Image (tube, helix red, strand yellow):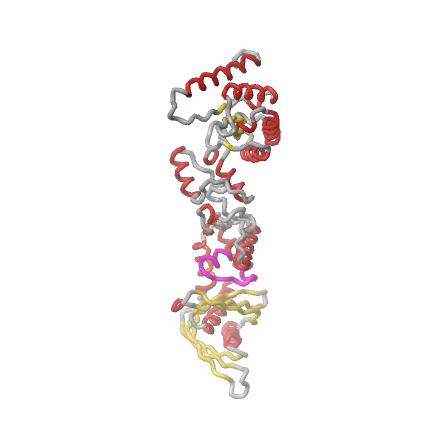
Amino acid sequence: MFGLEKDGIKAIATEGTQIVKDLVSSVPETEVVFQYSPESFTGTEIDYAVEVCDAVLDVWQPTATHRAIINLPATVEMASPNIYADQIEYFCRHTRWRKETIISLHPHNDRGTGVAAAELGIMAGADRVEGTLFGNGERTGNVDVVTLALNMFTQGVNPALDLSDINELVRVAEYCNQLPVHPRHPYAGDLVFTAFSGSHQDAIKKGLEALKRSNSGEWEVPYLPIDPSDVGRSYEGIIRVNSQSGKGGIAYLLEADYGVTLPRRLQIEFSQVVQRVTDATGKELSAGNIWDVFDSEYLKAIDPVEFLSHTTVPDAHASEVRHLTATIRHKGVETTIKGSGNGPIDAYCSALQSLHGIEIDLLSYSEQATGRGQNTQAVAYIELKTAEGTIWGVGADRNIVTAALKAVTSAVNRLLKA
C-alpha cells in the first residue's frame, strides 16, 4: 500500500511514535497511554511484526508501571482461530518489551470465529480484548464482548462486566445502532432460553425438577448453559410449544403456570391433543393457549353428560359396597342415574355404563390440590380402560369426591365423542 520496503514501513511507525511522544509535554495535566496497532498484523510475517512493534516501543520507552498497549488485530480473519492464537503466543514470547506492555486483541468476525479467536488469544497470553456489544462493527463485525464475557462466566471466570439486565442492553444497542439483535443470538436473543424440541423440553423439565430437589445452588440444567436469572431473564420463555414439541414442555408449562401436574400417561395423551392443534394451525402455542386446549378437552367436556350432584349410601348387607344416586344433565335433559360398586367412583362408572351401554373399568386414579386457602381446589385424574384402549378424564372441584366423578364424566364424554 505504501510502496516501501520493510525499513521504510518501520520508519513510518517509529517517526509517528516520536511525534506523539513529543506532543505529550503539551498536555501536562493529562495522563497519556500510548497504543500502537499494526493493522495488518495477521497478514504480516510474524517476526517482522515483532520487529516493528519493538522498534516503536524503543521510541516510546514504556515502563512496568506505565505500560504501553500493543493492539494486535485480526483486521480480516485470514486463518482459523488457532493460527491467530499461535501468532499471539509467538509475539508474547519474542517481544523484548513484554513486561512493559499490555497485549490487546482486536478480532473481527469475517470467518464467524471472532469469539473463538479471542478466547484462544487470551489463552495464548494476551491481556485484554477490544470488542463491541453484540458484535457490531464493519462488515461482519468485531468480536462480541457479550458472548465472550458470558462464555467466560459459564466457565466460572468473572468477566467483570455487568450483564445482569441483558434486555436493557439489547434495547439500548438496537436503538443506538438501528440494527436488531438476532433472536438466536447467544445469551441475548429472544429465543436463546427457549426450547421447542420435545426431547430438549423434557430434559429441561427434569433438570429444573432435579435442581429444586437438590437445593445445591449449583446450576446444572441441560440445554441451559447459564441460569436465565443471571442476565435478568425469567423462566417464562424457556419452553415454547409448536409442532416439534413433546409432552415434557407441555407438562412443564401447565405445572409452572397453572399448578397442574399431569400423570405421565396423561402427558402422552394430552401431547397428542396439542399436536393436532399445532398441526392444524401451524402456530406456536403459549402457556395460555395450552391451558385453553386442556380446559376445553378435559375440564369442559360436558357433552352429552354433565355431572350435577350425587349421594351415596353403604349397602345394608355389605359394608364395602356403595350405592350411588347421581343427578346429571344428559343431552340437555336433567335425569337421575344409579349404580353400585366398591366406592363412589366404581358405582358412578357402573351407572354410566348402564346409561350408554359401554364397557369401562377404572385403570388409575390420582389427585392433587391446586391454589391456596379459599381458592384451593382438588383436581382428579381418571384413566379408564375401554374396549378400544384407555382414555383419560380430568375433574376439578372443592370436594375431592365430586372432582373424581367429574373426571369420570370427562373421560366418558371424550370416549363417546371419539
Query: Number of marks in the image?
Result: 0
Asked whether 334 or 173 is in front, the reply is 173
Residue 241: x and y, percent?
Answer: 49, 51
Asked whether 361 or 15 is in front, the reply is 15
Asked whether 17 or 173 is in front, the reply is 17
Query: Does residue 107 appear in the picture of this structure?
Result: no
Asked if residue 97 lies left or right of residue 325, the reply is right
* Location of residue 258 with respect to 122 vertically, above or below: below
Residue at 47%, 51% (x, y): give it. Answer: 235
Residue 220: x and y, percent?
Answer: 56, 51
Residue 199: in magenta span: no
Residue 107: x and y, percent?
Answer: 53, 30
* Location of residue 78 with respect to 155 vertically, above or below: above
Q: In which quarter of the image is residue 84?
A: top right
- Residues drawn in magenta: 251-269
Residue at 38%, 36% (x, y): give it. Answer: 175
| Magenta stretch: helix, strand or loop mostly | helix
Residue 285: x and y, percent?
Answer: 46, 51
Residue 262: in magenta span: yes
Q: Residue furthest bottom?
A: 317
Residue at 45%, 50% (x, y): give it. Answer: 234
Query: Does residue 4 appear in the picture of this structure?
Result: yes
Asked whether 297 or 109 is in front, the reply is 109
